[in-house]
């Protein structure tokens, strides 16, 4: 066994310090934020025509190309991202994110190299239309090295709107501050690794509900998080924080945001799955992937991500090639660590917890998108399955889950120490 003095996270702190400095430098390079006006209401994709629709006026747009893989990026000034649509024609996939507080970014992953042509805003400023023209890989690479293309809005964008016949105003109060950070429990030693446990759902969001007992996912996940916390604290080797210790609602961004603000060494989001087929059973572990490993993973990610309208962390994101590469490398390292822990958790918990045949899966869950915190989403079983639901709701079942997580966490950090 390792003594407590060996359980340190100095390497993690150094890594995060470098990344914090990098993110500060990136933020200094970005333009001052513009005032948000419109949200991207739709991205309509035809064979070669693309139309972006906004629910209010935006300030303008610019486009640039990224080669290898080939992508077209559009920065929409004065806009917020909306829901991404499915790809079609020359576009394989569409992604959206918030580049900074005053600009939304849309990334079109191309099925083949193509350039933007004929871009124009509508006269009322509420849509942007352009065409994609297929080109050779050589021409695409050449154009991608050039400057971005600015798309100016019509002069009539800011014309006075028609007067309303009536108006209603209500006081909205002060802006809501950032969610308060939870208490870190365990030994008073900042050198010990910190594990943040996230009980899924909560408050007005009950999550899935068992058709057999009426048990709610939000209650089961909170009980599991508390049981795991108690087992981890009993080891004396790690510190623990819960994103929520009671029945409260947190948006997805706040959940992994808490882990990042606390500089967590590991983030575990705890859930219970549900399916129309009540025979489906067993636990599974998800780690981040931009492409889901199967249709079921994509379905589950879509359902969980609807807990609030949020697009995760924008990881790509500007014209600085070096910064982009460094962020990408950090994200990849974080995803590799998370995948290693996922396999370890399945191995250590499999004696007491039933896992699905292919337990380690990949999906684009919002809560997994912190670029510098290894994160997993643990679907502890199917609340829609009678046996799974009874197991997860029982004290004995919760202790078995907690024991498996505790053993995996201890081995995980022991391996990191040995590697250093």
Image: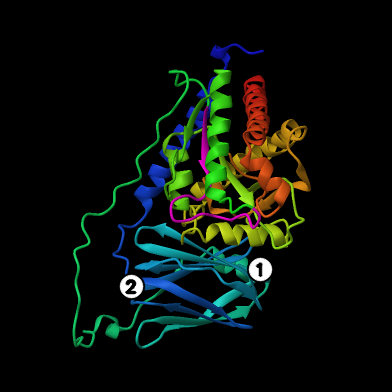
Q: Nearer the viewer, residue 286 or 379?
A: 379
Image quarter in which the N terminus is found: top right
Q: Position of residue 274 (x, y in %)?
A: 65, 56
Tell me residue 232's x, y (percent). Answer: 57, 25
> Residue 266, image x and y in percent?
56, 34
Q: Which residue is mark 1?
A: 138
Vertical arrangement, residue 351 with respect to residue 141, above or below = above
Picture quadrant where residue 54 is located:
bottom left
Write down the quadrant of residue 153 in the picture. Answer: bottom left
Residue drawn at x 34%, y 68% is: 78
Residue 415 to residue 49: above or below: above
Label 2 Cα neighbours within 10 Å, binned few <14 / some 14-19 / many ≥20: many
Q: Which mark is residue 59?
A: 2
Residue occupying image coordinates x 51% and y 47%: 322
Q: Which circle marks residue 415 in the picture?
A: none
Left or right for 190, reference 145: left
| Residue 204 visible here | yes
Residue range highlighted in magenta: 194-212
Please tell me whether residue 49 belongs to the stretch shown in magenta. Answer: no
**Secondary structure of the residue carrying numbered label 2:** loop
Residue 357 horizontal/vertical position (percent): 81, 47
CA–CA distance in space, label 1 to label 2: 33 Å
């Amino acid at each position: 066994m390792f003594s407590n003095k060996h359980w340190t996270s100095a390497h993690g702190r150094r890594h995060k310090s470098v990344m914090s400095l990098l993110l500060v430098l990136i933020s200094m390079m970005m333009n001052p934020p513009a005032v948000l006006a419109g949200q991207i209401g739709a991205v309509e994709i035809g064979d070669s025509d693309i139309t972006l629709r906004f629910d209010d006026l935006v300030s303008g747009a610019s486009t640039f190309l990224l080669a290898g893989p080939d992508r077209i990026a559009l920065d929409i000034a004065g806009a917020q991202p909306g829901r991404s649509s499915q790809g079609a024609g020359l576009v394989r996939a569409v992604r959206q994110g918030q580049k900074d507080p005053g600009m939304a970014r849309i990334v079109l992953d191309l099925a083949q190299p193509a350039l933007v042509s004929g871009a124009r805003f509508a006269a009322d400023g509420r849509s942007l239309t352009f065409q994609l023209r297929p080109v050779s890989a050589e021409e695409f690479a050449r154009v991608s090295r050039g400057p971005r293309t600015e798309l100016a809005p019509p002069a009539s964008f800011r014309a006075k709107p028609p007067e309303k016949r009536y108006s209603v105003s209500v006081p909205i109060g002060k802006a809501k501050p950032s969610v308060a950070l939870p208490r870190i429990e365990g030994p008073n030693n900042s050198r010990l690794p910190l594990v943040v446990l996230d009980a899924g759902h909560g408050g007005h969001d009950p999550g899935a509900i068992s058709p057999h007992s009426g048990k709610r996912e939000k209650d089961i996940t909170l009980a599991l998080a508390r049981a795991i916390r108690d087992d981890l604290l009993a080891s004396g080797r790690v510190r623990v924080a819960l994103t929520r210790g009671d029945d409260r609602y947190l948006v997805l961004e706040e959940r992994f945001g808490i882990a990042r603000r606390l500089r967590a060494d590991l983030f575990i989001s705890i859930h219970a799955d549900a399916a129309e087929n009540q025979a489906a059973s067993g636990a599974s572990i998800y780690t981040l992937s931009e492409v889901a490993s199967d249709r079921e993973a994509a379905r589950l990610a879509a359902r969980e991500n609807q807990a609030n309208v949020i697009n995760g962390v924008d990881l790509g994101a500007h014209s600085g090639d070096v910064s982009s590469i460094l962020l990408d490398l950090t994200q990849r390292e974080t995803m590799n660590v998370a995948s290693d822990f996922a396999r370890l958790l399945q191995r250590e918990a499999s004696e007491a917890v039933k896992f699905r045949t292919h337990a380690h899966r990949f999906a684009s869950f919002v809560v997994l998108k912190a670029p510098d915190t290894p994160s997993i989403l643990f679907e502890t079983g199917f609340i829609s399955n009678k046996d799974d639901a009874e197991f997860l709701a029982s004290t004995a079942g919760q202790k078995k889950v907690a024991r498996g997580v505790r053993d995996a966490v201890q081995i995980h950090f022991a391996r990191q120490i040995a590697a250093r």
